[in-house]
Amino acid sequence: MTDSVFDSKSEIIENAEVFEEDYTPDEILCRDEMMNEYVKVLRPIYKGRPPKNAFLYGDTGVGKTAVTKRLTDQLISDIKEQKDDHTLVANEFSIVSDTVVLPHEVTEDDDVDLTIIQLNCQNLPTKSDTNSSYQVAIAMVNEMRHQEDKIATTGYAPQAVYNMLYEEIDRVGGTFLVILDEVDAIGSDDTILYELPRSRSNGDIHNARIGVIGISNDYTFRKNLSPKVQDTLCEREIRFPAYEAQELGDILAARCEVGLVDGSYSEENLRLASALARRDSSGSARKAIDIIKRAAEIAEDEGATELKDTYIREAHEDLQQGDMVSSITHQDNHKLIALGALAEAERLGQTPIRTKTFHEAYQKFAEGTNTEPLTLRGFHNHLSRLSMFGFVEELTNNEGRKGGRYNEYQFSEDLSKETVKEAFDTMNDINWVTIRIRPGAEG
């Protein structure tokens, strides 16, 4: 057997799959109460009754999506088992970016009684809040059509799209469960959340019944929904709290038992990873798992056969950088342009930078990206949000009669111009602009 440059004498990771985001363990730990409530929401479907609507909320990495996948898989399996003659087949659709996954093959001879459509609203092509529900409706239409019959993401009147959606739902018939993950990404237009649950009572569909489950990381989104949507969507609410450090340790132990080589890690390693995840992300299992996975990769690269706390701390620092880049890319264009302008100001040695000078730099950056710049007041509102998110630090100065009171801005300790540039490099819809900044403007 020939040696390969890709061979490694150090093997700590035995099964890398268990550390991936799409992996669902055989047993969901530390979520019994939430699962029991969720079962109550799905039980009517199993019994052939009209489906219920529900709203799930909790921070990232606290089990909302994993529990949803586990229970919907179980629902499909149990319905199949219930029908000994196999006349009922569950058909599940899901969107992952632009990839359509059809786990259960359906033929024209199958009697499809349950259809699950799961969309991640964060991945839908939206340009503004006003077209978000519109894009959800288009995505649903396209999930039920063959490739040659799919419709474009723009160019249709909203009511025409909803009419097509109702036609497709009635064509398929039976029970529909629509799961909208990261539903807060649809913004202020919550039309779809009102239309779907009431489509049968409004006479828009006749051969199907629809249940909607909204999943959100942002509970304030639920509070901002219109009263009529709250009454419908929030028929049941299930809160997923952050994991405690001990719970994170239990989850890590279960993953490592399957994913890492025996004897390559210690309880102390798991406790440290759990504590770091608990401190940084308010108890995210995903963060704890990522820390252990990255630490194991670092150890293997170093030729080690055991995890060390130093590897775990190094992994934690690496992931902190990656998390910040990801957070930046999810901001709207005006906040991105403001961060780009601030990075340019730092490159030129002009930070902290006064508000008015910062706004002028922002305007130049915006013009370079063919974006209509905001007024000073609108810009200041975005600065306040960037400060609240922890991207920038706002410094208030008071020089009395001589200079008056003014604000200056610089990056927070967790952010740098290099990180902002890295985030821009990962995006295709906005380009970096090199600008010149006039020093000394007051503001």
Image (cartoon, grey):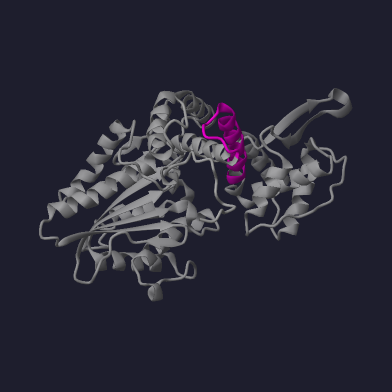
Image height of 159 relative to 350, above or below: below
Circle count: 0
Q: Left of 16 or right of it: where is 42? A: left
* Magenta residue check for 303: yes
Q: Residue furthest bottom?
A: 148
Which sits in the foreground, 225 or 59?
59
Q: Tell me, yes or no, if residue 310 can be seen here.
A: yes
Q: Left of 1 or right of it: where is 76? A: left
Q: Left of 380 or right of it: where is 8? A: left
- Picture coordinates of residue 287, whole percent (x, y): 49, 36
Q: Residue at x 28, y 48 (%)?
A: 72
* Magenta residue check for 151: no
Where on the picture, by quarter, is residue 425?
A: bottom right
Which sits in the foreground, 102 or 395?
102
Q: Residue at x 38, y 75 (%)?
A: 149
- Picture coordinates of residue 339, whole percent (x, y): 70, 45
For the C terminus, which image quadrant? top right
Image height of 422 relative to 403, above or below: below
- Picture coordinates of residue 190, whole percent (x, y): 42, 51
Instruction: Point out the stretch of residues depicted in magenta.
Output: 302-326
Q: Residue at x 62, y 39 (%)?
A: 321
Q: Tell me, yes or no, if residue 232 can be seen here.
A: no
